[in-house]
């Protein structure tokens, strides 16, 4: 009987040890991760590098594994692509693949309606994960697009997510209220705007004559990037305005911390 119990114990231990790697592997497989996807469409198989080519190229991160946060993150990424490329008022619910196809078809319709129109359209979006830890996931998108007009459209955009639920983080989730005053003081100093004058007194275009943080805020392990794209606070010719701070420099204003475990 004693030998039988010892034999059963040994078998149980062996089974337990065999299951442990499987459990660890399963946990690893379920953790949130990202891959990259690229979608390209060209008119009549033209070659962009040779010029005079209507084309679209979308390269963007895809959230994988994880749980509910994956759906939220991917839906927000697709929304960003649609809002950037689909300039029509009624918008749409196209997938990235359908969005690329619509871009080419819209050009064909324009060229058909206006035979004299011979300017090719171009759209390139390159997105990537620039930071990923237990507190925040930050994605950066660089867009370069031309669909006619005096000049094209170029922007740098950021999307920040809560890794737990995949929801977009707002400015209020990232910074304490006093951060706004800190940035405005620094911005006025760098742009030579007197502290006692209107924020638009030197030609800026802040809405309602009030300073505000940019729509796009990037986060890395050691930096915070405030990026005002062209048109956001100044005429197009003025270009972008970018303020960069080290996390240590503004740690008293941050609501999130870095655990220095970038994935």
Image (cartoon, grey):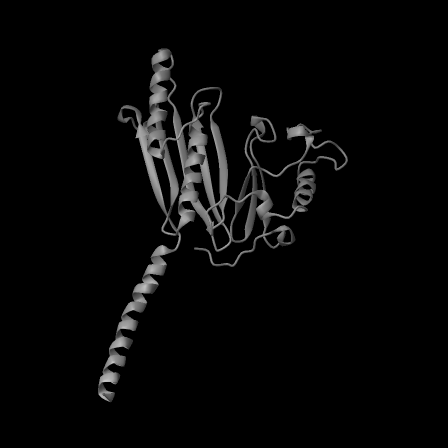
Evaluate whether residue 204 shows in this view. no
> Does residue 263 lie above or below 185 as drawn?
below
Residue reaching furthest to the right: 196
Vertical placement of residue 22 versus 245, above or below: below
Picture coordinates of residue 165 (x, y %)? 46, 49
Q: Quadrant of the C terminus?
A: bottom left
Q: Position of residue 10 (x, y in %)?
A: 26, 80
Q: Quadrant of residue 190?
A: top right
Residue 185 versus residue 91: which sits nearer the camera? 91
Q: Residue at x 41, y 48 (%)?
A: 68
Q: Position of residue 30 (x, y in %)?
A: 36, 55
Measuring from the top left, give residue 5's x and y in whole percent.
25, 84
Farthest front residue? 1
What's the residue at 58%, 43% (across, down)? Answer: 171
Q: Nearer the viewer, residue 175 or 221?
A: 175
Q: Residue at x 56, y 27 (%)?
A: 236
**Number of marks present in the image shown:** 0
Asked whether the viewer can see residue 148, the reply is: yes
Image side of residue 262 versus residue 35, left or right = right
**Which residue is rendered at x = 60% and y = 52% of the image?**
255
Quadrant for the N terminus in the image:
bottom left
Q: Nearer the viewer, residue 110 or 246?
A: 110
Q: Quadrant of residue 25?
A: bottom left
Residue 128 vertical placement versus 199 (above, below) = below
Q: Residue furthest bottom?
A: 2
Asked if residue 5 lies left or right of residue 253, the reply is left
């Amino acid at each position: 009987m004693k030998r039988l119990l010892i034999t059963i114990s040994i078998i149980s231990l062996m089974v337990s040890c065999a299951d442990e790697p499987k459990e660890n592997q399963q946990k690893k497989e379920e953790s949130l991760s990202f891959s990259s996807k690229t979608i390209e469409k060209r008119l009549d198989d033209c070659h962009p590098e040779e010029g005079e080519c209507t084309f679209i190229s979308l390269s963007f991160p895809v959230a994988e594994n994880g749980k509910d946060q994956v759906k939220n993150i991917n839906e927000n990424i697709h929304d960003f692509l649609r809002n950037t490329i689909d300039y029509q008022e009624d918008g749409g619910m196209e997938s990235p693949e359908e969005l690329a196809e619509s871009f080419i078809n819209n050009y064909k319709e324009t060229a058909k309606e206006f035979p004299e129109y011979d300017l090719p359209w171009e759209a390139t979006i390159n997105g990537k994960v620039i930071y990923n830890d237990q507190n925040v996931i930050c994605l950066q998108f660089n867009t370069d697009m031309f669909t006619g007009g005096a000049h094209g459209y170029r922007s740098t955009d950021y999307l920040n997510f809560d890794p737990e639920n995949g929801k977009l983080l707002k400015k209020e989730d990232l910074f304490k209220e006093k951060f706004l005053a800190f940035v405005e003081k620094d911005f006025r100093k760098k742009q030579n705007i007197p502290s006692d004058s209107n924020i638009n007194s030197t030609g800026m275009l802040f809405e309602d004559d009030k300073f505000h943080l940019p729509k796009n805020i990037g986060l890395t392990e050691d930096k915070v990037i405030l990026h005002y794209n062209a048109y956001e606070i100044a005429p197009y010719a003025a270009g972008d305005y970018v303020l960069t701070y080290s996390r240590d420099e503004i740690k008293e204003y941050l609501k999130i911390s870095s655990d220095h475990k970038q994935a």
